[in-house]
Amino acid sequence: MTITAEPDLRYPIGPPVLPTQPLEHGARMAYIAQIALLPDQIRAAVTGLNPTQLNTPYRPEGWSVRQVVHHLPDSHLNSYTRFKLALTEENPVVRPYEEGAWAELPDSQATPPAVSLALLEALHIRWGVLMRHLTDEQWVRTFHHPEQQRDYTLDQALVLYAWHGRHHLGHITELRRREGWA
């Protein structure tokens, strides 16, 4: 008898693993490439979904596909801002936000996904330009997250947000697979 564990629908690609040492240039470029590809990957993942499918939660008690799509630019705009703060201030304290509450606001419920996809695409172009021009010294700059009571280097934030995009892409693609939505 084979016992298979139920997959954890919250973490389709597993939890993030942050580096403890500065990244090598090639690793940084690979993570930046993941961030650059995300808008097209999310667009492909939601292409052809009807309004009912867009409003389907990716797991019980989870966000709808629509909310996930709108969450990505919300979250990544915050990260982009944190990068710029870390580059221009000494270990700034960043402001947390209530992402769950943001996902319940009217713009996350009623806006067509194409609007957030355009925002995500433009944001990732700007963010990518910034990241590709950073020096090794800039990548070890930090910001402080008061809710998590820890400092993050920009290398760690890069890895976290590359994971974050793949994580939410996994929510959508796994839902499509489970539901048989071609």
Image (cartoon, rainbow, N blue to C red):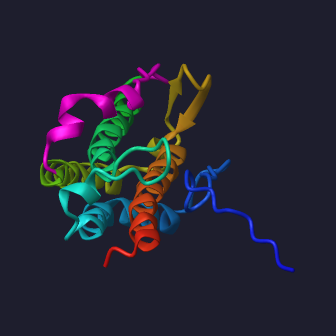
Q: Residue 44, how many percent across, how many down?
A: 25, 71
Q: Residue 21, how many percent across, how many down?
A: 66, 50
On screen, residue 150 versus residue 101, left or right, reads right
Quadrant for the C terminus, please.
bottom left
Name of the residue lying farthest toward the right: 1
Q: Quadrant of residue 92?
A: top left
Q: Residue 109, how many percent across, how many down?
A: 22, 38
**Vertical placement of residue 56 versus 79, above or below:** below
Quadrant for the N terminus, please.
bottom right
Q: Residue 73, how many percent across, how many down?
A: 27, 44
**Vertical placement of residue 41 versus 119, above or below:** below
Residue drawn at x 32%, y 46% as measured from the top left = 72
On screen, residue 35 versus residue 16, left or right, reads left
In this view, the residue in front, 149 or 105, is: 105
Residue drawn at x 28%, y 50% as measured from the top left = 55
On screen, residue 130 versus residue 9, left or right, reads left
Residue drawn at x 83%, y 78% as measured from the top left = 2
Give the mark count.
0
What residue range appears in magenta? Answer: 90-112
Inspect the magenta stretch and tell me whether residue 102 lies in it.
yes
In this view, the residue in front, 14 or 174, is: 174
In this view, the residue in front, 132 or 111, is: 111
Q: Quadrant of residue 50?
A: bottom left
Inspect the magenta stretch and tell me whether residue 28 lies in it.
no
In this view, the residue in front, 1 or 129, is: 1
Q: Quadrant of residue 82?
A: top left
